[in-house]
Image (cartoon, helix red, strand yellow):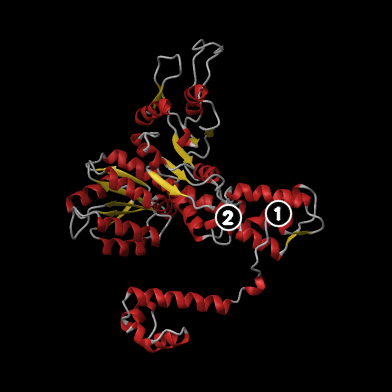
Amino acid sequence: MKMSRETVNSTNEKRRTLLIVEDDPALQKQMRWAFDACDTVVADDRERAINQLRKHEPAVVTMDLGLPPAPDDVSEGFKLLKEILALSPDTKVIVLTGQHDRENAVKAVGMGAYDFFAKPFEPELLNLTIDRAFRMHDLQKENARLSALEGSPLSGLLTRDPGMLKICRTIEKIASASVTVALLGESGTGKEILARGLHALSSRARERFVAINCAAIPDALLESELFGYEKGAFTGAVKQTLGKIETAHGGTLFLDEIGDLPMSLQAKLLRFLQERRIERIGGREEIPVDVRIVCATHRDLKAQIQAGEFREDLYYRLAEIVIEIPPLRDREGDATLLAHAFAQRFARDNARRTPMLSDEALSAIEAHGWPGNVRELENCMKRAVIMADGDCITAADLGLKAPAEDLEHLNLRAVREEAERNAVLKVIARTNGNIARAAEILGISRPSLYDLLGRFGLKKENVA
């Protein structure tokens, strides 16, 4: 029976390219047969895998962490995973690991892998995961197209700081992975914005995002808020009420300030995370709940564990992926960037012209430590926009002390010379005065280094 050209084209369009990275020829053949719905290409080591990736640009890759030269050494697999994600960040990588190698599997997911499977695997189950990965790849491509028009789920996080931008990329990478995420950082650093972005980028985006602040609810009420209760469970329980965990079924539960969760509830939360089932207060029925857990806290959980205030086993259940968010004072240039954005927003909200920030005000913003982070800056700018006389915000309007330094004292040549001097001194000290080695580290010639030593008043004999 002959097929028309239109039918052939339609069939080819539906077939997807799957790259299988596996050094066992028998298993390689078995996988090609099992996943014949795809156009499969294979590789048995890191170099061939990268060549196949460049040539075929597959949307999905399955790879064994144990690759030659040493099959039991996962470092080669991690190196390949890193290279795949660097060359093609949108590629969905499904990692195959040993039966009891969950630690490396979670590490791979943390690096950006889509999912993991333990060997030996059921071909039917892995096939479902591959199909889901292809659909996720298509969905994210469509989301990227729409985001270009409507803005990203993380667009509420305004930053130019490299560290924060890296965190945003991490959130995008792990959004589709079924791991619990802990967001650690000071109050006001944007933990809830990141949690909502994580939910919006995940496959659960159409379901509910439910947030609960563990520090804002009295201990006596927190259990019923989390787990719900049956009618008549206690005085005042006049009807059956679902808890936050059950309400978030299918979606994401955000446990804010998890470090304030009382010890009496930590054991019950741990049991839920292990069993994924809850019992309402006053109930006897175990209720299965499918929910992704994202938690956040400003507290040092490891210090709390040492002090006996937080369960270590609960920490490791909650913190499969840990993201540490830097405070505003450590985000280079973000304070002034946010200040300008807040000035525009609050002027618009109050039907006023957007005020300018004076050089004195900007210097004060840069010099302030912002212990309350973005939330403190937001409140400060809102007050300043309302209280400022005229169209210019001063340091006094912000309630901040103007620093002595101002823009006129910032000379780029002086700043560059100071940086060069510090770098030369550090490397000379590190190399114990070895000019050849110091020049190599600094990336300059030996005559250039001697010129710098002369310019900075450092005698050659003192560093020889």
Residue 186's x, y, as percent? 51, 46
Residue at left offset 38%, top offset 58%:
85
Residue 283: which quarter of the image? top left
Query: Looking at the image, which is closer to me, 247 or 224?
Result: 224
Q: Is residue 264 left or right of residue 358?
A: left
Residue 37's x, y, as percent? 33, 47
- For label 2, the crowd category at 10 Å Cα-Cα, with few meaning under 14, some 14 to 19 and many 20 or more, is some
Residue 276's x, y, as percent? 38, 28
Kind of residue at badge 1: Leu
As helix, strand or loop, the secondary structure at mark 1 comes to: helix
Query: Can you identify the residue that label 2 sits on?
Result: 369
Query: Looking at the image, which is closer to me, 186 or 100?
Result: 186
Residue at left offset 51%, top offset 55%:
164
Q: Is residue 393 left or right of residue 423?
A: right
- For label 1, the crowd category at 10 Å Cα-Cα, with few meaning under 14, some 14 to 19 and many 20 or more, is many
**Which quadrant holds the C terminus?**
bottom left
Query: Can you identify the residue that label 1 sits on?
Result: 398
Q: Is residue 144 visible?
A: yes
Q: Earlier in the sequence, mark 2 or mark 1?
A: 2
Residue at left offset 57%, top offset 46%:
188
Kind of residue at badge 2: Gly
Residue 100's x, y, as percent? 23, 41
